[in-house]
Image (cartoon, grey):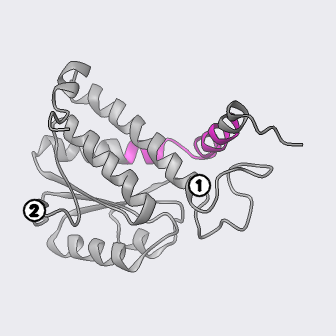
Amino acid sequence: MAETTAAAMAARICNQINSVFVASSQAALDVLVEEIAAVAARDACIIVHGVGREGLIMKALCMRLAHLGLRTHCVGDMSAPPVSPKDLLIASAGPGGFPTVDAICQTAKRVGATVVVVTAQRGGSASRLADRVAFLPAQTMADDQKDCGGGGGGLLPMGSLYEGAMFVLFEMVIFRLASALGQSPEVIRSRHTNLE
């Protein structure tokens, strides 16, 4: 009988997310840090996009990038500027592609912006539109009928494993960028909104 205490369930979920990083290389982290640092060096803009729960995690990344002092926006926000050739679009397409994500990547490519796609499916339509791919080999709705990345009946349904792994990946990205950009915790904290 499976343990059902909160601690036991949390441990299983954390182990499931950890297995994504054990199975993958350093590449996704390196791709994101390199591309975001390059944008910071040229004082350009970072635009992020994702749909559904992936989109919520992308918004969390956008918030932390702003805390690092970077110019960053979410696609669809009224304050998002037009994308330019110097800019970076980071789009998430866990299952490989979505019509809206693909269209946004095409628009960014058309004007010459750099496109990075975070995905669990290397061969998807969004990856083919990307300049670089941050591959995160976690279960999404594209493959949630088989046991992916958790071994022995993971608790996370549908794309939750991918979304949880995105959160962890992005926290590592922010940690590395803070060091690379010389941002102290006090300076990062000072950029948090005071209008809540």
Is residue 17 located in the magenta-colored stretch of the structure? yes
Q: Does 102 sit above or below residue 185? A: below
Indicate the position of residue 62 as horizontal and vertical percent values.
Answer: 27, 48
Is residue 30 located in the magenta-colored stretch of the structure? yes
- Please name the predominant secondary structure of the magenta segment in the image: helix
Indicate the position of residue 184 as horizontal and vertical percent values.
Answer: 23, 20
Q: Residue at x 21, y 19 (%)?
A: 186
Q: Residue at x 45, y 73 (%)?
A: 97
User: As shown in the figure, which amino acid type bears the numbered disc 1?
Assistant: Ala
Indicate the position of residue 5 as horizontal and vertical percent values.
Answer: 74, 34
Quadrant of the rendering where the C terminus is positioned: top left
Q: Does 149 sit above or below residue 104? A: above
Regarding mark 1 in the picture, which secondary structure is present there?
loop
Which mark is drawn over residue 19?
none
Q: Residue at x 10, y 62 (%)?
A: 81
Report which residue position mark 2 lands on: 81
Which mark is drawn over residue 138?
1
| Residue 61 seen from this side | yes
Q: Nearer the viewer, residue 148 or 108?
A: 148
Regarding mark 2 in the picture, which secondary structure is present there?
loop
Residue 139, image quadrant: bottom right
Indicate the position of residue 50 as horizontal and vertical percent values.
Answer: 36, 63
Residue 160, image quadrant: bottom right
User: As shown in the figure, which amino acid type bears the numbered disc 2?
Assistant: Pro
Q: Which residues are magenta?
A: 11-31
**Sequence order check: which comes first, mark 2 or mark 1?**
2
